[in-house]
């Protein structure tokens, strides 16, 4: 089933009044536990990576594992950058394999929030990638006691939400209706009327941050009022922490003794949520409603004139750097034929995250400049073809 378009995924959830969990992961134990939970109860899942957690793991090293887990999954998966802080973060997340991004400028004044969100939407939509914005303010910090970060909730206003969505073009909106990130004492008081009014005004999948600590009935009411994505982390981290403490109490001392069972602790809590939020058992119906996420390989085979192999190597190194930074490009590889008498001596293999990148890459100023001044003048003899990719284990 593998990776699917996150826009299709959340529109299906919104239409059918269930919510997909966006679980923040901070390492491989979390990743494996989350995938086990989703497969056990046939649920779609969003694997979420929060920029605020990048101090705990190497984003660049973890992402290939996340992409591999999504590819081999028996349920539909999307990969999301959570609380992206800047345009550059969003470009990087997409390059590493996220197929949904959040831009969080919610602490800035409305006009600035709109401006920063719009920049990310323009870039991401040109890469075929949906964007979540946030309006209002959900205080607290994931994984910590909410009381230690006692900011005031700023509730999302219906009128501002309408303006924000019109002016930014976001695909999903994270709203503030009384939840708080992190561990809190007591149940938060949620403003369901406000949520219903926002849903009626926008008709977009809505997102709740700060899922930990809500009562079962609160989740049901949030989903009935238009919430299609629930962000969840602290309870997973606490379940993992409790497992480690129990292992220590049983005399475990080594890393492997202490972390034994962490995956299952994460899986059990995630599975509980999937059943409660109504995503369990939806994998097949959702898959049928979603476009598969299929990268494109932009292949160019060419010969050079007026440039020896050393000159070609310099040009290719520059191209890997310049073209690899264009939004939507996942990888740039260059090659030189093994056989001396190959019809084409060199190649570019440029992987785009989505077919939309074929056009946005062609028009990007960095590509135009490189192609017009560096490449085309020396590579008149060439063929260029874009291929949709299928990899082993994925459906055709
Ligand atoms: P909790 O840590 O409160 O579950 O919130 C997670 C979250 O909102 C991540 O964006």
Image (spheres, rainbow, N blue to C red):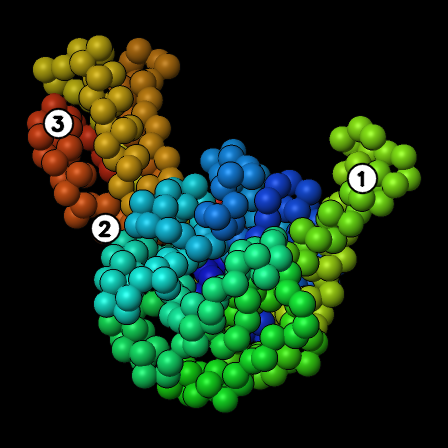
Looking at the rendering, which quadrant does residue 43 occupy?
Answer: bottom right
Mark carried by residue 260: 1
Disc 2 on helix, strand or loop?
helix
In terms of depth relative to the viewer, which is nearer, 263 or 244? 244
Q: Which mark is residue 240?
A: none
Q: Is residue 210 left or right of residue 262?
A: left
Seen in the picture, residue 267 relative to 252 is either above or below; the reply is below
Per the model, the C-alpha gap separating discs 3 and 1 is 55 Å
Residue annotated with mark 3: 374
Left or right: where 103 falls relative to 271: left
Relative to residue 209, is residue 248 depicted above or below? above
In the image, residue 16 sits, relative to residue 54, either above or below, namely below
Mark 3 or 1: in front is 1
Tell me, yes or no, whether the two marked residues, 3 and 1, touch with CB atoms within 8 Å.
Answer: no
Which x, y percent locates residue 133?
Answer: 38, 65
What residue appears at the point 23 percent right and 24 percent down from the top-left corner?
A: 318
Provide the residue designation for mark 2: 360
User: Neighbour class for label 2 at 10 Å: few (<14), some, many (≥20)?
Assistant: some
Residue nearest the viewer, comparing 355 with 34: 34
- State the image coordinates of residue 82 (x, y, percent, origin top left): 47, 54
């Amino acid at each position: 089933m593998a990776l699917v378009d996150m826009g299709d995924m959340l529109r299906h959830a919104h239409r059918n009044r269930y919510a997909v969990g966006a679980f923040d992961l901070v390492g491989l134990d979390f990743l494996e536990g989350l995938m086990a939970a989703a497969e056990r109860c046939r649920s779609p899942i969003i694997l979420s990576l929060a920029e605020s957690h990048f101090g705990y793991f190497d984003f660049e090293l973890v992402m290939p594992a996340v992409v591999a887990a999504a590819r081999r999954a028996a349920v539909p998966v999307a990969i999301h950058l959570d609380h992206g802080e800047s345009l550059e973060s969003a470009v990087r997340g997409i390059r590493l394999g996220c197929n949904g991004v959040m831009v969080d400028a919610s602490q800035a004044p409305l006009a600035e929030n709109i401006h920063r969100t719009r920049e990310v939407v323009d870039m991401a939509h040109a890469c075929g990638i949906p964007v979540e914005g946030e309006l209002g303010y959900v205080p607290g910090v994931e994984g910590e006691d909410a009381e230690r970060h006692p900011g005031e909730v700023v509730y999302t206003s219906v009128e501002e939400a309408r303006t924000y969505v019109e002016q930014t073009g976001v695909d999903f909106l994270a709203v503030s209706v009384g939840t708080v990130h992190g561990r809190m004492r007591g149940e938060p008081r949620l403003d369901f009327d406000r949520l219903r009014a926002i849903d009626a005004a926008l008709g977009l999948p809505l997102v709740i941050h700060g899922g930990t600590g809500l009562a079962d009935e609160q989740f049901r009411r949030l989903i009935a009022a238009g919430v299609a994505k629930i962000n969840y982390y602290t309870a997973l981290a606490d379940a993992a922490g409790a497992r480690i403490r129990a292992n220590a109490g049983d005399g475990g001392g080594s890393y492997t003794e202490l972390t034994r069972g962490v995956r299952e602790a994460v899986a059990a809590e995630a599975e509980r949520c999937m059943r409660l939020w109504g995503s369990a058992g939806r994998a097949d119906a959702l898959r049928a409603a979603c476009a598969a996420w299929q990268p494109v390989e932009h292949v160019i085979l060419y010969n050079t004139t007026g440039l020896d192999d050393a000159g070609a190597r310099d040009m290719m190194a520059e191209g890997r750097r310049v073209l690899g930074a264009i939004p939507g490009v996942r990888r740039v590889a260059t090659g030189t034929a093994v056989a001396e008498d190959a019809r084409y001596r060199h190649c570019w293999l440029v992987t785009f995250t989505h077919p939309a990148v074929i056009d946005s890459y062609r028009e990007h100023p960095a590509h135009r400049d490189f192609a017009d001044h560096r490449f085309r003048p020396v590579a008149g003899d060439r063929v260029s073809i874009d291929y949709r990719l299928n990899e082993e284990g994925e459906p055709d």
